[in-house]
Image: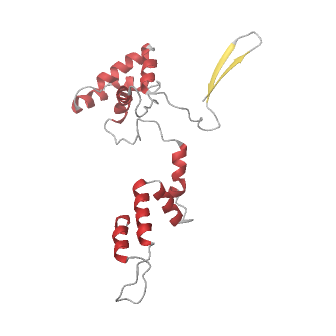
């Protein structure tokens, strides 16, 4: 959506709102839900609808379902979907995390009542750098499965520890046994024992 203001020669200002032909707008960082609640409380329409929505979500499951089906609750929910509360998120370990989560769920519980809930999380999305670390692994391209498995293992501390133990035990040569006339590349029993958790 594009908002534009035009001024003619008589200094009349015209404001137009039009859909963008460029596709979806760029991602912007969401407000935290505590701040979004403060902004909502500064707007009388948003504030009153927010109070109604909290009342709609109070009580047990049966009462909540009946309340959410009412026109008043549905109207409150529609107004709140256009408020800062709808897109707000929380940060792990933030100062008012519990309050933030309560504000988030006060909107999103109403949206999901009676449906499967597919929202990922009330928390901010993961950073792109973390996503890109996993990109080659989840891309589905069969370019080098061994390299991809090694990359995946490098991202997991337990896997790295087990791999190191496997390498240190399984790459050692064992001294020749008196009954066998040759030297094994590694102790097969110890190697299989340490390799078992990885399988």
* Residue 107 relative to residue 62: left or right: right
Residue 128 location in percent, x, y? Answer: 54, 43
Who is closer to the viewer here, 39 or 16? 39
In this rendering, the answer to whether 22 lies above or below 12 is below
Residue sitting farthest toward the right: 9
Q: Quadrant of residue 53?
A: top left
Quarter of the rendering occupied by the C terminus: bottom left
Residue placed furthest toward the top:
10
Residue 104, quarter of the rendered image: top left
- Count of marks placed on residues: 0
- Say which of 79 and 147 sits in front: 147
What residue is drawn where x is 27% and y is 31%?
A: 65
Is 66 displayed left or right of 26 in the figure? left
The one of 152 and 105 positioned closer to us in this rendering: 152
- Which residue is located at x 42 percent, y 16 percent? 41
Q: Is residue 84 above or below residue 128?
A: above
- Please, which colouring scheme is shown? secondary structure
Q: Position of residue 185 (x, y in %)?
A: 44, 79
- Work out which quarter of the rendered image holds the N terminus and state it: top right
**x, y percentage for residue 108?**
38, 32
Q: Quadrant of residue 28?
A: top right
Foreground residue, 8 or 137?
Answer: 137
Seen in the picture, residue 160 relative to 2 is either above or below; the reply is: below
Across and down, in percent, residue 165 comes to 40, 64
Q: Residue at x 44, y 62 (%)?
A: 164
């Amino acid at each position: 959506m594009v908002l534009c203001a035009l001024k003619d020669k008589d200094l009349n200002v015209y404001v137009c709102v039009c859909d963008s032909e460029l596709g979806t707008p760029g991602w912007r960082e969401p407000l935290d839900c505590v701040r979004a609640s403060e902004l909502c409380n500064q707007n009388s329409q948003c504030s009153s609808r927010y109070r109604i929505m909290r009342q709609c979500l109070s009580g047990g499951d049966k009462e909540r379902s009946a309340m959410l089906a009412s026109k008043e609750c549905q109207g409150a929910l529609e107004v709140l979907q256009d408020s800062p509360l709808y897109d707000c998120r929380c940060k792990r370990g933030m100062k008012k995390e519990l309050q933030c989560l309560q504000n988030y769920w006060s909107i999103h519980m109403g949206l999901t009542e009676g449906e499967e809930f597919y929202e990922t999380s009330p928390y901010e999305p993961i950073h792109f750098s973390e996503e890109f670390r996993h990109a080659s692994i989840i891309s589905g391209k069969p370019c080098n499965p061994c390299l991809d498995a090694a990359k995946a293992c490098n991202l997991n501390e337990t896997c790295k520890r087990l791999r190191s133990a496997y390498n240190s035990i399984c790459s050692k040569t064992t001294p020749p046994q008196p009954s066998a006339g040759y030297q094994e590349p590694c102790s097969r029993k110890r190697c299989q024992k340490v390799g078992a958790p990885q399988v």
